[in-house]
Amino acid sequence: NELEQMRAAKAWATWEGATLTLESNPTVVEQFGEAHRALSLARIECHYFIHHCFMEANQLLRDAHRLRDIPGFIVHGRYDVICPFDNAWALHQVWPEAELRIAPTAGHAASEPGIVHELIDATEHFADRLT
């Protein structure tokens, strides 16, 4: 049923749009609820989730030892309700060489100022190592 499919897709996408950032942005929520975007987002995300993001259970944590000699940053928004902080913390526990950065006034979106700041800082850190 196409109407039911669209209703579910819009509910899915508008929830994500509303929870993506620390402070909900009505314009973003409206954009996420647009029919084509909502259906595309819901289909892609459902496809990934049905396939467990194309990873085995705990694969990232299990195989993190392969990253031990690779420097890195784990950046996470303090108020991210889409990906819980426990995931970032668990990864940091098995990859202690990575620097865990918490953006104190951010949710999930990489476009939030706190996340942007941490990503730029991490990029500059690696740029300094190359020069």
Image: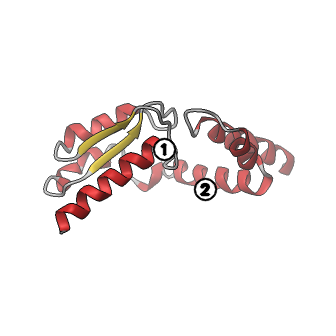
Q: Quadrant of residue 67?
A: bottom left
On screen, residue 52 versus residue 59, left or right, reads right
**Residue assigned mark 1:** 113
Q: Quadrant of residue 8?
A: top right
Mark 2, Cα crowd under 10 Å, few <14 / some 14-19 / many 20+, is few
Q: Amino acid at mark 2?
A: Ile
**Residue assigned mark 2:** 44
Find residue 122 and report its horizontal and vertical position in percent: 30, 53
Q: Quadrant of residue 126?
A: bottom left
- Count all numbered tags in the image, as a single digit: 2
On screen, residue 88 versus residue 113, left or right, reads left
- Residue furthest out toward the bottom: 131
Taking the spot 37% from the left edge, 54% from the top edge, the residue there is 120
Q: How is the image coloured?
A: secondary structure
Residue 9 in sight from this viewpoint: no
Q: Amino acid at mark 1?
A: Pro
Dot 1 or dot 2: first in sequence order is 2
Secondary structure under the numbered disc 1 in the rendered image: helix
Taking the spot 36% from the left edge, 44% from the top edge, the residue there is 75
Image quarter hosting the C terminus: bottom left
Q: Check the image and report above or below for 35 versus 90.
A: below
Taking the spot 44% from the left edge, 41% from the top edge, the residue there is 114
Find residue 35 and report its horizontal and vertical position in percent: 79, 53
Secondary structure under the numbered disc 2 in the rendered image: helix
On screen, residue 113 versus residue 14, left or right, reads left
Q: CA distance from mark 1 to mark 2?
A: 26 Å
Find residue 6 and report its horizontal and vertical position in percent: 80, 48
Residue 28 in sight from this viewpoint: yes
